[in-house]
Amino acid sequence: MNPQLESLPLWASLPITLLLLLGSAIVLIGALGLVRLPHFFQRIHGPAITITLGTGSILIASMIYFSALQSRLVFHELLITAFVMLTAPVVAMLLMRTAVYRDLRARDRRPTVSANANKSKTTTEVYPFSAKEEP
């Protein structure tokens, strides 16, 4: 075992453990949402929300760990946490807006169905739940 880990004080090891468990559980839930949900807009929602809190918890635990080992404050992880918390939601929003724009363009290019044709709906959209209901 690492000799530095054995000398870690209890006041630091308890929050580190709790933050690591919390962060990894949150990231796992987000990853399961990414795998299990059926459509893009549903799949992007889980990781977009959970990556910010999960990664933030893991990085704060890392900041406490290295601050306790080096007996001084370590701010590198705090800068990484701020960067992730600022960029992850923005990237998720841009991905969602891109998908909405793609669906709107696909809706504009949809082939018209004649009045005598069967009433079956043909769609070129990737995400059928975002299609408008036509009378």
Image: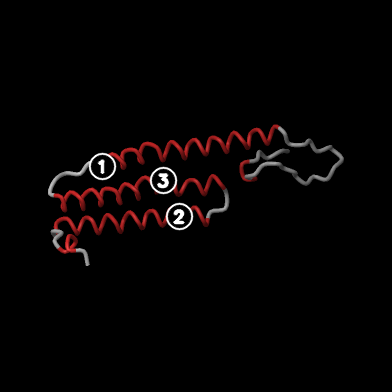
Instruction: Name the residue beneath numbered marker 3.
Output: 49
Secondary structure under tag 3 reads: helix
Depth check, mark 1 against mark 3: the one in front is: 1
Question: In which image quadrant can residue 78 be found?
Answer: top left
Instruction: Name the residue beneath numbered marker 2.
Output: 31
Crowding at mark 1 (Cα within 10 Å: few <14, some 14-19, many 20+):
few
Secondary structure under tag 1 reads: helix
Hey, what amino acid is under mark 3?
Ile
- Tell me the residue at 47%/37% (across/down): 93
Of residue 31 and residue 121, the one placed in the foreground of this image is 31
| Dot 2 or dot 1, earlier in sequence | 2
Q: Quadrant of the C terminus?
A: top right
Q: Is residue 43 left or right of residue 10?
A: right
How many numbered discs, if any?
Answer: 3
- Tell me the residue at 36%/58% (across/down): 25
- Tell me the residue at 62%/45% (across/down): 129
**Distance from label 2 to label 1 (Cα)?**
26 Å
The disc placed on residue 76 is 1
Instruction: Note whether 108 is above or below 21 in the view shown.
Output: above
In the displayed image of the protein, which residue is found farthest to the bottom? 1
- Tell me the residue at 31%/41% (across/down): 80
In the displayed image of the protein, which residue is found farthest to the right? 116
Q: Is residue 133 left or right of residue 55?
A: right
Q: Position of residue 12 (x, y in %)?
A: 17, 55
Q: Position of residue 103 (x, y in %)?
A: 63, 37
Secondary structure under tag 2 reads: helix
